[in-house]
Structures are given as structure tokens and as C-alpha cells.
Image (cartoon, rainbow, N blue to C red):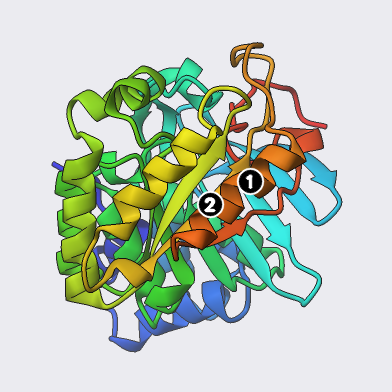
Amino acid sequence: MKPLSKYETIRRILSDFKQPAYRYKQITDAIFKQNVGEYERMTMLPPFLRDELIRRLGPRVCSVVPVKELMSKQVRKILFATPDNERIEAVRLSYERGWNSYCISTQCGCGFGCKFCATGTIGLKRNLTADEITDQLLYFHINGDALDSVACMGMGEALANPHLFDALTILTDPSLFGLGHRRITISTIGLLPGIEKLTREFPQVNLTFSMHSPFDEQRSELMPINDRFPIRDVLRALDLHIRHTRRKVYIAYILLRGVNDSVAHAEAVSELLGARGPGGHLYHVNLIPYNSTEVTPDSYGQSDRDQVARFVRILKSKGINVTVRTQFGTDIDAACGQLYGHRSEPT
């Protein structure tokens, strides 16, 4: 049985105590409009009700607790402890135009073992609950940060966690976070059942597919999931997603020097995406610089500028939409592929 979210539990408590309907709105307004983070401070509620909320849910609204924080230019990374004392990480990116974007985790660790990703070296400890996923954002909100957009690109494979869809329901609920579907991005290494479910249930949520090599044999070596869900099968599912949603699909491609950044790779990516048919123009490649960590292979390095420029030129010459992503937070291990969930004492 899946765990109830705090919001479902609050509704049950109110029902058990035969409270008037407006009580739920009082509580959600306190959290989302007044930034109240403790049930004891909800003084508009009768004392017995505050006591019951604390008894059932604990004193704090957030189920995750910050234990360490690192700051860099435009980046804030927080290490959270979960109720069972595991560690997860979330990142806030602050853009100069005043926009805050968040990268949150969906699993504690990850079981898919992509060779270039620090999180994959941990292995999967467990899926996060819907509360633990959304409470990473709630922590920032309660502390006064605007929630402009969110990406499930932190620790874990989002579509491997069945609680993700409950989290999306919470994030898009107008009485709770009230985020527009198009302000949410889900990243996946290519789990077909999850892609199909997202297409059905949340078609306007943005979707990013991590490709990282156009060649099956090499992709299976870098990303073992390719043996289960080969790249061409994933692309067919993405074609259907585009046909159903009329939305862009983003292709994430981490450039590894001398591994997947050759002319042959660029041409193969162009060939794969250039043959997609009527919706092909809605594919957009994001080229991502590789970020090294203490736990990923020393043999991987960043592609040099000339090689990146050559890769871009080949894709553009074939009519493929492409952007080279600017990376933030590499100095605090907050960039793509660097989240590891170090067990550290508070600082």
C-alpha cells in the first residue's frame, strides 16, 4: 500500500474530527500563502487539532530536514535528511533575469549504474515518497524562495519511482503548489512504461531523454538500461509522445572527450533525429559538459571547445535544434551528474 501524502492525511484528520470544510483551506493557506512551517504556529486552528496534526505528522510541515548547505555563484545546494536518516540533495539555480529553477531528487541513490554519474555509484536505497519529493521544493518555498520551475533531474531515475505521479499531482494542485504543467520537467534514461504513463496522465509536463550515445553497443556500456530499452524503441515512444502532446522533447547528451564526441557520433545523432517524420522538428538536443567527481572514472573528461563546436555545426547542418548548456555549480558538485548525497555533519 502506498503511503498517504501529508495532504491526504490532513483531510482524513479533519474528517475524523468532523471539522468544517474550510479547515483544509486554512491549513493549506498557512503553508503556501503564509509560509508557516510548523503546525504549532497555525493558531487559527483549535489546540486539539494542532495537537493531532503534530501527533500524526510530526511538528514540522516538511518531512525532509536540511543538514548541510553549499553556495556558489547562482547556485544553492542543500543536503537533506529523510525521516529514516538517508541523504538526498536538491539544487536551486538563480538566473540573472530573476528566475529560480530547482533540481530535485526522486530516489535515494539510483540503481541504473550509468558510468558517468556519481549518484549511480551509490546504488538504489529506496524510492522517495511523494512528500519527500515535493518537500524539497516546499522547504525553499517556506523560506521565501519563488518556485518558478522544477526539474526532476536530481538523484535517481524519476520514472522508476511510482510515487512520482502522486508528486506531480501535488505540485500541480491549485490549492497546493499550483505549478503549471509546463513549468515541470521530467528527465529519464528511457523507461518506456513511465514515458507512456507520462504521455497519458501529464502530457504537458516537459520530457527530457538522456541519450549520451547514438550507438546501442556503446550506450549499453555507458548506460546498462539500453539493454532493456534500446534507443530506437525509446525514440519511437517519444515520437508518439510528440504526436499526442505537440510538445518539444529534449535530448540530453553529455559530451565525454574521446568517448562520444566524435564526428561519427554527431552524424549518427543527426541521422537518428532527422528521420523522425512530421514531429521531428520538436526534438531539441541539449549538449552538456561532463562534470567530474571523486567517484566517477578518471578516464572521462570534458570535450574541448573545438570538438563541441564541430558537434554543434554537424547537428545544425542537418537541421537539428541544438543548444550547449551552461553549467552552474560544478565547484560545489551541484551540476549534472554530480549529486551524491554525502553524509556530512551540518555546516
Q: Is residue 2 visible?
A: no
Numbered disc 1: secondary structure:
helix
Q: Residue at x 64, y 60 (%)?
A: 140
Q: Would residue 346 appear left or right of 269 to someone viewing this image?
A: right
Check disc 1: other Cα within 10 Å, few if <14, some if 14-19, many if 20+. some
Horizontal and vertical percent position of residue 289: 65, 40
Instruction: Look at the image and tell me in which quarter the N terminus lies.
Output: top left
Q: Residue at the right extreme? A: 73
Q: Could you tell me how many numbered marks the image carries?
A: 2
Q: Amino acid at mark 1?
A: Arg
Q: Is residue 176 above or below residue 264?
A: below
Neighbourhood count class around disc 2 (C-alpha, 10 Å): few under 14, some 14–19, many 20 upward:
some
Which structural element holds mark 2?
A: helix
- Can you say whether 230 is above or below 310 in the image? above
Q: Which mark is residue 228?
A: none
Residue 278, placed above or below residue 240: below
Q: Nearer the viewer, residue 107 or 291?
A: 291
Mark 2 highlights which residue? 314
Residue contact at pointers 2 and 1, CB within 8 angstroms = yes
Q: Name the kind of residue labelled 2 in the image.
A: Ile
Query: Would residue 283 be found to the left or right of residue 344 on screen?
Result: left
Q: Which residue is located at x 59 percent, y 16 percent?
A: 296
Lateral position of residue 56 relative to residue 150, left or right: left
Residue 34 vertical position relative to residue 314 in the rendered view, above or below: below
Residue located beneath label 1 in the image: 310
Residue 206 picture location, percent across and down: 39, 66
Residue 225 or 58: which is nearer the viewer? 225
